[in-house]
Amino acid sequence: MSDTVTPETTRTPSSPYGLHRVVLQDGERPALPQAARRLDARPEIWPDEVRVDVETLNLDAASYRQLREAYGTAGVRQAVLDIVAERGKMQNPVTGSGGMLIGTVAEVGPRSTLGLEVGDRIATLVSLSLTPLQITDGLQRWDGEDERVPAQGHAILFGRSIAAVLPDDLEPELALMVMDVCGAPALVDRVVREHHDRTGEAPSVLVLGGAGKSGSLSLAAARRAGAGTLTAVVPFEAEAELLHGTGLADHVVLADARDPLGLLGAVEAAGGPADVTVVCVDVPGCEHPSILVTREGGTVIFFSMATSFSAAALGAEGLAADVRMLVGNGYTPGHAALALDLVRSDTQVRSLFTRRIAPTAD
């Protein structure tokens, strides 16, 4: 651990929530780092902080999709650089979301409680939208073709941040992808078990975006937690083919999750509505359809950062739907360990993830 604290970092007492890193403009109210417009990303650490040398950023799917659609592959690199330079963090101003990163611990403050040591190779389990970040290489190694961004620079973890040392038995890129969405399977596991304890019945589970990272892990978690019928909804035949034969879902439904009546008809044909609906798609407009395909008294879990929560609330009201709606906040105790164990133990899930690292050649 480092016992050195520069004079600059002694001017303001540190906050375990990172309030001391929030840069306020005239007239702005105090805010937590995620809600703040700009963070102080200087490399000097406060006594309870950790500085990480950045290796890879992993942009969340909704943010990457929006940036690529807005700027194209050729412009997305500069868009990310501009955001980080302006905000001192990677927070898409449209989606409000960020992602996470892989890096190596470079310095640990003497009062840090994260249990990290210099040299640990870690994945952060808190969003880049609240993590002070500087990029020093201009992202020259990134072609903009996917959300994994090779990068050099540094990031700062606060006293209440969350990080996990990368496991030795998994490729770093694989571990990063799993940890990026590890909140989803952990919450699905909890909801499925709670439903069974409350009703004595195995709930039917429907996953919108079932072939994706969070979707496939959610299906595996639901199965292991004792779910009944599992149904995956995907938009394209190619994604349906990925799931066929994996055993992750009992039914694979081809439908547009943004089309209320089309989705409802397809799900009903597969035996729906569902007791638990999990929304893992990265496009807006799935709020009302997901409510329609959920049984009265059931639960909708929103994991997509593209979700409009006002649309979800007003939609349920307008449909007179008695459903419980949960926001997947990305953190459930033990979430990283649960997700990594699913990938280790389920060869089908692991195969879906490894295909994203090295897709099969055509």
Image: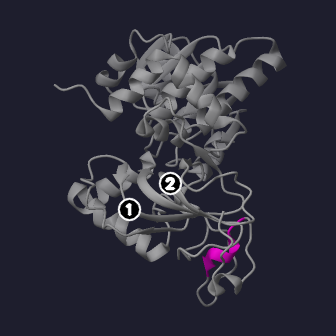
Rendered view: 164 above or below 203: below
Instruction: In the rendered view, tell whether residue 277 sits above or below residue 313.
Output: above
Q: Please identify the quarter of the rendering in which residue 7 is found.
A: bottom right
Residue assigned mark 2: 104
Q: Please, what secondary structure does the residue beneath circle 2 have?
A: strand
Q: Which residue is mark 1?
A: 152
* Amino acid residing under circle 2: Thr
Between discs 2 and 1, the one toward the N terminus: 2
Residue sitting at 65 percent across and 29 percent down?
188
- Looking at the image, which is closer to me, 293 or 84? 84
Distance between mark 2 and mark 1 Cα atoms: 11 Å
Q: At x 59% / y 11%, what residue is drawn?
A: 229
| Callout in the foreground (2, 1) | 2
Residue 22 drawn in magenta: yes
Residue 352 percent across, percent down from the top left:
40, 24
Mark number, residue 11: none
Please state the extent of the stretch shown in magenta in the rendering. 17-23
Quadrant housing the C terminus: top left
Q: What is the three-letter code of the residue carrying label 1? A: Gln
Image x and y of residue 91, in percent: 49, 63
Measured as percent of width and height from the top left, residue 168 is found at 51, 33
Q: At 36% from the left edge and 72% from the top edge, which residue is drawn? A: 82
Instruction: Give left or right: position of 53 versus 73.
Output: right
Say what secondary structure mark 1 lies in: loop
Seen from this angle, which residue lies furthest bottom? 26
The answer to if 203 sits in the magenta stretch is: no
Residue 118 in sight: yes
